[in-house]
Structures are given as structure tokens and as C-alpha cells.
Amino acid sequence: MISGTRSGSYEMSTHLLNTTRPRTGNASENASRPNAISVTNLSYRAAGNKGRSIEILNNVDLTVKEGEFVAIVGPSGCGKSTLLNLIAGLIKVEGDSLSVFGAPVRGISPRIGYVFQTHALLPWRSVLKNVEIGMEMRGESATERRQRAMDALKQLGLEGFEDHYPSEISGGMRQRVSLARTLVAGPDILLMDEPFGALDAQTKLLIQDLFIEYWENHRKTVVFVTHDLSEAITMADRILVMSSRPGRFKSAYSIDIERPRHLAHVRTMPQYTMYWERIWEDLKEEAKTAMLTRATGG
Ligand SMILES: Nc1ncnc2c1ncn2[C@@H]1O[C@H](COP(=O)(O)OP(=O)(O)OP(=O)(O)O)[C@@H](O)[C@H]1O
Ligand SMILES: [Mg+2]
């Protein structure tokens, strides 16, 4: 558990959620599980300048198994957030190119939790009230709501900040509140869009370790978008590399590192360096293309 103080410092203990982490679990185990998310031949265009439409995604195929942790890396602007928005049902598409637990996506689903790239907290609600919002909408009792929200806040090092408003806490804290809000809703699928991107370096390491432990205990289906290769390798079962816009998946890497994983340990492993070098080699080309396209206004 992480315990927080009002000065914002943390202390890790090993009994988060009082469960034992499974000893095994890697990419090969996922093959026989049912699909949680299926994306088939999905293309998406949005309105651009001067009435022209721009192609954001091109023939995207993606299958995520139940309980699998998939990370997506790709250059800025390649369509990662757009893809998550489509899976979440926030952007509507016709046809059956997108399905979640076997049913076509036709709007938002309570089985999906979304941690947005920006925290998206409601400024007029306190930290506690922000975390409680999903439970409130489902009509859960005030006592139950408070208990679960306080527990999540405590685990994310935010105890003592429950009555603050989003404007009174730091960016990193706001992002943790957003994570708490999503986790207490108990979704089956977590879509996470650079959830730790705004955290300072040390807090990021602490929260990453905490989240790995949370995931290993709960085995939710996760699609995790990040620009941080180290983060992706440390956490995911599989990493998908997206091309520059129009985005499509150009390669996939199964991360065959035994669980439970601990950040400090994983980063000393020879496989870690190998994955990092190979994936960066792949990603670098796309990042260069995206940078040149932006520089030339394409
Ligand atoms: N509603 C929209 N209308 C027009 N263009 C859009 C719309 N949404 C996204 N875009 C454009 O689509 C492209 C992909 O955007 P998206 O936010 O999905 O990228 P991303 O991969 O998440 O980037 P980043 O890594 O910077 O977050 C960008 O060029 C963006 O400007
Ligand atoms: Mg994005």
C-alpha cells in the first residue's frame, strides 16, 4: 500500500489489497482466452482544414484477450487516442469493425474504464466527490461510496486530500485522482491514455510499481498508450508499435518476462535492454516521419 502525507511523500508497503501475486503469467498464456476487444480492418477519417478530411487510422486490426495487458506505442499524432476513443464508444462508427466482449460497440459501456490523457476531473467537485461520481451514478449508498473512494485514495497516496478541489492539487495528484476514479468503478477493461505521462519522475516510478501490482492481482484487460518504452516493457504482455499517421499497427512484440514483475528488477534484466533496443529501432523510423511531417505542416 502507498500511504500519503499532506506533504505528498509516499511509502510503499508490500501488502497492497492483501492478495498474493500469481507467480506465473506471460504472453503465451493469453492465446486460449476469449477476446475482450476486437478491431477489424478499422479506418477512420476526421474533418480537417478547408473542408478536407484527414485519414487518422488506416486498416487497424487489433485483438486483445481477456486479462491481457497490451501497450501501444507510436509517434505523436498517429491516432492512439482516437483509437481508444473509438473502442470506448466515444466516437461512433458504423458497421461491425469494433467489438467488445463479442458485441459491436454502439456507445459507452459500463464495463470499460477510461483514464484520459488529461485528467478530466470536474473542477466544482472535491477530490472525494470526483472519485465517487461513477458509484453515485449507479446509486450506491453514501457509506459504501465513501469507503471505497477513501480506500482508493489512500492506496494512491492521496489520503488527506479528499476535501481539496482539483485546482488545489498538483498535476500529478490530479492524474492519480483520475486513476482512483476509474479503478473504483471496477471496470473489466481499462483503457489508459498516457496515464502517468504528467507525473514527476519519482512519483511515476512509485505509481508504475503500484499499478503493476494492482494489475497482477486483478488481471483486468488493459490497453495502455504510452510514449515511454520503459513503462511499456515493464508492464505489458504485448507491445504494439503504431506507424505515423494514418496510424496502423506495424509490429508486435510479446514481452516474455516472468511475473510478478518489479520495476527495479525488470530494468536490470538483459531481456529488458534487448526489447528496448529492438522496439526503439522500430519506433524511431515512425517518430522521425511524424516529426518531419509536422515540421513541413503535412
Ligand atoms: N476530431 C478531430 N478532428 C480533426 N482532427 C482530429 C480529431 N481528432 C484527432 N485529430 C487529428 O488526428 C490525429 C491523431 O490524433 P490523436 O489525438 O489520436 O493522436 P495521438 O496518437 O493520441 O497523439 P499524442 O501522442 O500526441 O497524444 C492528429 O493529427 C489530430 O490532430
Ligand atoms: Mg493521444
Image (spheres, grey):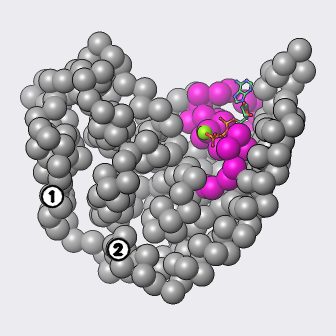
Q: Point out residue 213 in the picture as x, y percentages from the top left corner.
A: 30, 63
Q: Position of residue 16 (x, y in %)?
A: 19, 60
Q: Where 247 falls versus 82 (above or below)?
A: below
* Residue 81 tag number: none
Tell me the amino acid under the disc marked 2.
Ala
Give me the residue at 37% from left, 25% from top.
121
Q: Are marks 1 and 2 in contact (CB under 8 Å)?
A: no
105 is within the stretch colored magenta: no
**Magenta region: which residues?**
72-96
In the image, is 103 to the left or to the right of 21?
right
Give 160 or 238, whichever is nearer the viewer.
160
Q: Which residue is mark 1?
A: 11
Of 58 and 290, which appears nearest the observer?
290
User: Would you place residue 230 above or below residue 75 in this image?
Assistant: below
| Mark 2 Cα-neighbour bin, 10 Å: few <14, some 14–19, many ≥20 | few
Element marked by disc 2: helix
Q: Which mark is residue 264?
A: 2
**Residue shown at the point (51%, 86%) measured from the top left:** 270
Q: Tell which of 243 and 276 is nearer to you.
A: 276
Q: Quadrant of ligand 1?
A: top right
Q: Secondary structure at mark 1?
A: strand
Look at 25% across and 23% down and name the residue there: 168
Label 1 C-beta lies within 8 Å of the nearest ligand 2 atom: no
